[in-house]
Image (tube, coloured by chain):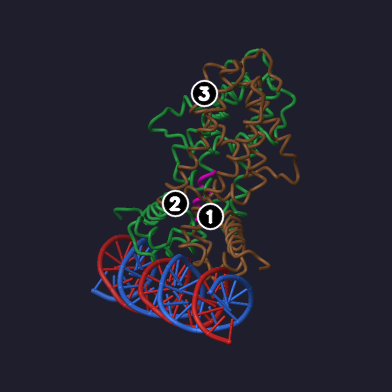
Chain colours: A green, B brown, C red, D blue
Amino acid sequence: MLIGKKDKADISRARILDAAAGLFRQYGYGQVSLRVIAEAAGMKSGSLYYHFASKEAIVVEVLDLGIEMVHQKVDTAICAMSEQASAGELLHAGILNHLQALFAFSDYTSANVRIYGQVPDEVRKANRRVRRRYEALWMSILSRAEESGGLRASVDHDAFKLMLIGSLNATLEWFDPVKDDVQKLADSYTEILLGGLLNHVESNV
Amino acid sequence: MLIGKKDKADISRARILDAAAGLFRQYGYGQVSLRVIAEAAGMKSGSLYYHFASKEAIVVEVLDLGIEMVHQKVDTAICAMSEQASAGELLHAGILNHLQALFAFSDYTSANVRIYGQVPDEVRKANRRVRRRYEALWMSILSRAEESGGLRASVDHDAFKLMLIGSLNATLEWFDPVKDDVQKLADSYTEILLGGLLNHVESNV
DNA sequence: TTACTCACCTAACAATCGTTAGATAGAAAA
DNA sequence: TTTTCTATCTAACGATTGTTAGGTGAGTAA
């Protein structure tokens, strides 16, 4: 047993998902055939059905991973922060880790952002559950920031959460993490947002 | 001559583009066939070729219109503003009119935002010219705002322009102009952005 | 009337699509 | 060794794709 029985199949599954994520990102869902996914994964199209029930099953998993990878990174970062963290520190950590995850797993995250709106209804409905969970994480971040006292009262958390996630995700369309530094992007993003979001007692992070 | 010769063809062209924009927005480029576009426009697929040379020619025009409709609205609004307008007033006008155009022509604007990244290279290249022109308009808005004196020096115009356009476009994915008021969206967006963007002499619009 | 153009239709083309059934070669289990 | 299982391949299926050639009828110009 050179390779564990389970491992071989898992490796192939991962290669298929990686290939699909990259292709969906670049060409869209409808323009990517199972044959090109299979070729990119090093097999023939019929073999995909050993690992997935259908093309929709593949895209469901790609979309879910695109959200969950960001969720996990942001969640662990926020959980690791001290109880005394300020609102500014909390928001900066959330923004930084969201952006870092976006570009670290950009095939999955960009595929999600780009094709979520054009995928069959059942697929979108499946991904919506995962999205809601991530939005709930941001609601808890905003609540915790508010309790720490530095937040403007006029800001509606529900709308701000969507505004923030949408704005951050939009960076996938223009920011180049090779040419520029994600950390600096997070800094300037936080600087602009916090200046408007925080009471003007102090506006440094 | 009940209908001018030219009019008839122009009306059909417009119906085709409207149908295509709505379908591209909802299902993506590759999943929309010429047959369903034709059906939505009230004709058969072969007839599309009387008005357009190919499917790509249709999507090129849809994408260009999606940018140009916003460009024109923002441009006329900014041009109409007084010479003494403050930085805050200028930015608020730009943001408001961008958002209003986004939702007024949402099939075209949303189709552009959603499928730009998954369209054949030549199509994307064609639309890039139009996008660059709109970005240049925002550069001139930011320059004019800076000349009026209220802008933070630390903000890089080139990056901020992309950040702003991306953030505004992202509202198409979560804001419902029927349920809520676009004007209020523009107000809170401006409030948050300007608070961070402006010197803190005054932060009201 | 006759000739002509405009806007559309019909019917088909080759190519490609997602999917399936059955075969196969190597490894694991008996 | 024999059997079973795992992961893949081959080859085909009906459906659908963008596109084209040629036809058609209504309206315009002569």
Image spot of residue B68 (x, y percent): 56, 44
Mark 3: few/some/many CA within 10 Å (<14, 14-19, 20+): some
Residue at the image point whose x is 42% and y is 34% from the top: A176
Front residue of A69/A40: it is: A40
Front residue of B65/C18: it is: B65
**Residue stretch in magenta:** A59-67
Image spot of residue B173 (x, y percent): 62, 45
Side of A94 relative to A10 (left or right): right
Q: Which element carries disc 3, helix, strand or loop?
A: helix
Image spot of residue A12 (x, y percent): 38, 55
The chain holding disc 2 is: B
Front residue of D14/A45: it is: D14
Separation of disc 3 and disc 1 at Cα? 33 Å
Residue B177 versus residue D20 in the image, above or below = above
Amino acid at the residue labelled 2 = Val
- Residue topped by disc 3: A187
Question: Where is the N terminus of chain A found, in terms of image quarters?
Answer: bottom left
Indicate which label's residue lies in the foreground, 1 or 2.
Answer: 2
- Residue topped by disc 2: B123
Residue at the image point whose x is 57% and y is 67% from the top: B38
Q: Which element carries disc 2, helix, strand or loop?
A: helix
Separation of disc 1 and disc 2 at Cα? 28 Å
Q: Are marks 3 and 1 on the same chain?
A: yes
The chain holding disc 3 is: A
Side of B59 relative to B194 (left or right): left
Q: Which mark is residue A60?
A: 1
